[in-house]
Image (tube, helix red, strand yellow):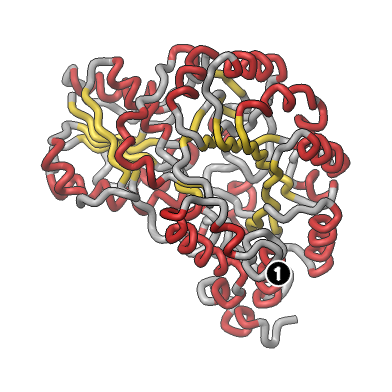
Amino acid sequence: MKILLIKPKPDSFQFGLAPFFQTEPLGLQYIAASLEQAGHTVEIRDMRFERLPLYKILQKSSPAVVGITCLHILDATAVLRAAEAVKAYDPSIFVLAGGHAASAYPEALRESPHIDSICIGEGEEAITTTVDALKKGYDPHNPKNTALLNLAHVPVPNRKLVSRYQKNYCCLNFMPVSTLETSRGCVYRCKFCSVWQVYKGTTRFHRLEDVRTDYEATGANLFIIDDLFWSDEEKSHELAKMLLKSKERKNWILTQSRLDLVANDPHLLEAWRPLAKYFDIFFGFEAATSERLKDLNKGCGVDVVSEALKIARRLGFGVTGNFIIDPDFEESDFRTLWAFLEEHQLRRVGFTILTPLPGTKYFDRVKDELLVFDLARYDLHHLLKRPKLPVKKFFELYCESWRRSVLNLKGQKKWWHWAKEVSPQKIPRLARILYRTQKLMDPNAYLSENVLPDTGCMQATGEGAM
């Protein structure tokens, strides 16, 4: 069968770093490889960077099936819109939706008359099962994978299917960027995260040989998208040895890991460091006190921060990461955070508002307290309930946190310092990115769309609050 897989173009992001981390749809490339292995013909279109309108693509492709990925809950509206467009073009096309957010919270898509099936679980099996049923003339139901895949049986992703878009994929000033997956899942239970729920609190690994094959097919800049890198000491050492046997070396690698894992095994970092000229680690710092980390169910305290940072910096790793701002913060909590940033010299960091994402147990627990249910506001930069501080004061302090980051062009790193880090032809795009980041430091930008129901303008402006 002819199958078209779509990465939809989401509604414009107003805040956050999402526009500056535009990565390839690796999940679709894995699914495409599995479908091709089953004998189907597959095409991928990334509508974020596609010049042709969808109806033109449908005319050229003539697919029997269109699969649309819903990676984040913010994609839901774009998925619904794309499904409607497909059915408007040809009602006989079978439309299915899948992806992480679709699995975590299928309710966001379930009422659509334009979606024939929602694939819950890992797409390599769920979508292939659905398409095979269609090919045999069966009426497929919404498949739900109760068993997790053995990743040793998952073929390496078909990267050729997105080669036309590769130049557009970036992580801030690194462009183009490829993505690589060596494992899936996470064994930790952070309360704000849906990953452990979707993957049942497990971590599974791809075959080392497959990872090496895929690693050698990626470009000079690489984002390893594992939810928890270096989670298994033995397997991580084996993988490092395998990749070091390759002649392939990268300009830049970014991984996501935990402070306690780094603090406990400096030899593992030593093994990985030769693979790239620049090697960054993204840490989920999340909070500046052990009490708040405990509330977030992070499974560690701030006592490991100094040791982890000392090891990473000594070995030449760049340190970046994120902190979570709780709507219940008082001014003293912000000041504690700023002191923590200064103590540990953390500049390459971001700040997100604690958000109960639909599909998490945290959402189920607090949804009665929420005042906002528009999914477009679940971008980690909107208030969904009343903060303890007046809204204006909250965002003034929130923006002050961003001003202490490297993205503040009035701070330590000026725009010309950024420009030196990219080739001349990429400076215009970098300039547009950096220009947009300055909105993160403008309280009025947040206030313009963060008026909460039943709070009125007085709360939004801060006048008369308290």
Residue at 34 percent of width and 38 percent of height? 97
Q: Report whether 53 appears left or right of 151.
A: left
Q: Tell me the quarter of the picture where residue 204 sits.
A: top right
Q: Report whether 8 appears left or right of 263.
A: left
All told, the count of numbered labels is: 1
- Which residue is the site of mark 1? 400
In the displayed structure, 72 sits above or below 273; it is: below
Q: Nearer the viewer, residue 249 or 403?
A: 249
Q: Nearer the viewer, residue 452 or 413?
A: 413
- What x and y, as percent, mark residue 149? 48, 18
Residue at 78 percent of width and 46 percent of height? 293
In the displayed structure, 444 sits above or below 298; it is: below
> Can residue 452 be seen at all in this image of the molecule?
no
Q: Tell me the quarter of the picture where residue 241 sits.
A: top right
Residue at 21 percent of width and 24 percent of height? 41
- What x and y, as percent, mark residue 267? 78, 22
Residue at 58 percent of width and 14 percent of height? 245
- What x and y, as percent, mark residue 186? 63, 29
**Mark 1 residue type:** Glu
- What x and y, as percent, mark residue 329? 76, 63
For mark 1, give the secondary structure.
helix
In the displayed structure, 248 sits above or below 225; it is: above
Query: Can you say which quadrant of the picture contains the N terminus?
Result: top left
